[in-house]
């Protein structure tokens, strides 16, 4: 038996150096785009990534992408899923998501509970004379990661100390519904012996805090729930890294080295460093382009608290990305996002004549982050789209008026219905809109394709999103 052990690390080193060199070359030649798909939980990230890959893989045979210039001008030469760049991240299981979506009785992907990654290679004929003379076809590599939306909410914690974070959480618990939902947890804290930490007590306190977060999520659909791993723990379930909770400021005398406060503060800092910072550094600090998916219709349906909770969560998340234009060197070393697309997702939940209002409402919601990004030189666009269209608009006479209905199969049912989803306000809803319970948008089952083998999934404006995000890199 030959002993190859001493050479293995050298071989591995060379392989990884080579990989890095290739990555850098792609970046230097502007041949890689790292797309940040950003969105709160259930905003439609996994479905968007799946639909995007699906459309790109089928773009040559069946071009349902008239506004994606590279395809409509016949310069698109095909695309393929490639080996992903990082060996320590799971592969995004495109096949596992697309198969159920396109079968006779289709179903949606399940909620994401881990990080995954996909790399697509897109071959195209360049338009520039010099490029054309150098080669017949060029390749653009598109890297995308998928992750549970809940984890995104941790990014704002990076800027906060334990005391500041705790104060923020207690402040939010002054208002309903958090006030009532957090009662049991806060009552326990009041009666807890703080001077000496005891493992069982730490677990009880963090357990009740986790229950409180879960109830906020499941009963009220709230978004701003920190730490994100408490509701979707992934591989960290049950570890001390997730065994802490916010504590009130109880004075110096209760902060001895063995006190509950010291131990929880230590764990909070370890969580920030080992979980949040690592996630951020490895996956969130190196994007070139960003799409922010916002489920405005769900937020409207869930009521004013949920709506404002979503806005605060979004704004605090967006503060963690780097925006601006960058030259070649800074693109390699300190990448920045130079194109930002805000999207209202699932626009097929409402009739076509409401799309414009949804876009105007979206503009109103993202006004501040959009203006901040524009100020830093970023190209910004907003649009309403649907990654997978599940309904069609039907216009009918009703009481002498022509009304637009949507027709589709509601989630959990088996038969199509015709329903009037109502109207979308073009600006922020007023108190009387909320009081009148005007917003109640239904969710739908995926469309049943007549010939799933032959057809691509229907969408609304996915091609315009692709054009905005990738068009210039494919020219
Ligand atoms: N009608 C319609 N529904 C959609 C569309 N995209 C997503 N949905 C619905 O939204 C749900 C959530 O979509 P996902 O893509 O799983 O959301 P996510 O952001 O990945 O969620 P997490 O993994 O929990 O963070 C799906 O199960 C569908 O019910 C769309 O384009 N049209
Ligand atoms: Mg997902």
Image (tube, rainbow, N blue to C red):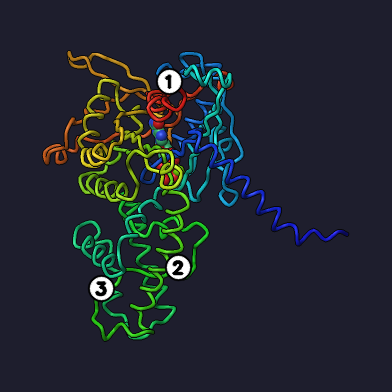
**Based on the displayed image, in which of its 4 quarters is residue 133 positioned?**
top right
Q: Nearer the viewer, residue 182 or 250?
A: 250
Q: Nearer the viewer, mark 1 or mark 2?
A: 1
Which quarter of the frame holds ligand 1?
top left
Residue at 42% over, 27% down: 466
Quadrant for the C terminus in the image: top left
Q: How many marks?
A: 3
What separation in Å lies between label 1 and label 3 (alpha carbons)? 54 Å
**Based on the displayed image, in which of its 4 quarters is residue 21 positioned?**
top right
Residue reaching furthest to the right: 1
Q: Mark 2 and mark 1 in contact (Cβ < 8 Å)?
A: no
Q: Which mark is residue 248?
A: 3
Which of the marked residues, 1 or 2, is nearer the chain's N terminus?
Answer: 1
Q: Nearer the viewer, residue 248 or 213?
A: 248
Q: Nearer the viewer, residue 293 or 4?
A: 4
Q: Is residue 411 left or right of residue 83?
A: left
Q: Is residue 233 left or right of residue 431?
A: right
**Based on the displayed image, in which of its 4 quarters is residue 135 positioned?**
top right
Residue 299 percent across, percent down from the top left? 27, 41
Whether residue 202 appears in this view of the structure is yes
Q: Which residue in the protein does label 1 denote?
A: 68
Residue at 26% over, 66% down: 164
Under tag 2, what secondary structure? Answer: helix
Residue 65 percent across, percent down from the top left? 44, 19
């Amino acid at each position: 038996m030959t002993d190859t052990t001493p050479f293995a690390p050298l071989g591995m080193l060379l392989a990884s150096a080579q990989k890095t060199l290739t990555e850098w070359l792609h970046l230097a030649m502007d041949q890689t785009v790292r797309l940040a798909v950003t969105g709160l939980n259930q905003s439609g990230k996994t479905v968007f990534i799946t639909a995007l890959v699906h459309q790109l893989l089928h773009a040559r045979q069946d071009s349902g992408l008239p506004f994606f210039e590279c395809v409509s001008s016949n310069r698109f030469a095909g695309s393929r899923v490639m080996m992903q760049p990082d060996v320590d991240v799971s592969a995004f299981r495109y096949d596992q998501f697309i198969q159920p979506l396109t079968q006779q009785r289709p179903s949606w992907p399940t909620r994401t509970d881990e990080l995954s990654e996909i790399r697509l290679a897109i071959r195209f004929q360049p338009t520039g004379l010099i490029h054309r003379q150098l080669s017949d076809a060029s390749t653009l590599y598109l890297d995308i990661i998928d992750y549970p939306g809940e984890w995104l909410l941790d990014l704002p914690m990076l800027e906060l100390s334990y005391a500041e974070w705790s104060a923020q959480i207690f402040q939010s618990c002054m208002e309903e519904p958090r006030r009532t939902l957090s009662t049991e947890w806060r009552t326990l804290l009041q009666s807890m012996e703080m001077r000496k930490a005891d493992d069982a007590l730490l677990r009880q306190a963090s357990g009740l805090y986790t229950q409180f977060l879960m109830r906020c999520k499941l009963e009220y659909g709230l978004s701003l729930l920190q730490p994100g791993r408490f509701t979707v723990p992934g591989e960290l379930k049950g570890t001390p890294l997730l065994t802490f909770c916010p504590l009130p400021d109880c004075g110096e005398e209760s902060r001895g080295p063995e006190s509950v406060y010291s131990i929880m503060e230590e764990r909070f800092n370890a969580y920030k460093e080992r979980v949040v910072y690592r996630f951020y550094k490895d996956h969130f600090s190196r994007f070139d382009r960003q799409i922010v998916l916002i489920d405005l219709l769900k937020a409207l349906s869930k009521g004013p608290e949920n709506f404002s909770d979503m806005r605060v969560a979004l704004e605090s998340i967006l503060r963690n990305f780097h925006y601006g234009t960058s030259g070649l060197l800074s693109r390699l070393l300190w990448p920045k996002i130079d194109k930002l697309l805000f999207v209202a997702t699932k626009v097929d939940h409402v009739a076509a004549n409401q799309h414009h209002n949804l876009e105007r409402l979206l503009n109103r919601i993202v006004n501040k982050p959009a203006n901040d990004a524009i100020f830093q030189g970023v190209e910004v666009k907003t649009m309403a789209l649907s990654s997978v269209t599940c309904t069609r608009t039907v216009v009918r006479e009703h009481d002498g008026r022509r009304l637009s209905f949507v027709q589709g199969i509601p989630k959990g049912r088996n038969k199509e219905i015709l329903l009037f989803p109502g109207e979308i306000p073009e600006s922020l809803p007023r108190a009387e809109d909320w009081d009148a319970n005007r917003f109640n948008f239904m969710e739908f089952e995926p469309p049943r394709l007549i010939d799933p083998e032959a057809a691509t999934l229907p969408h609304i404006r996915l091609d315009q999103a692709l054009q905005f995000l990738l068009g210039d890199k494919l020219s």
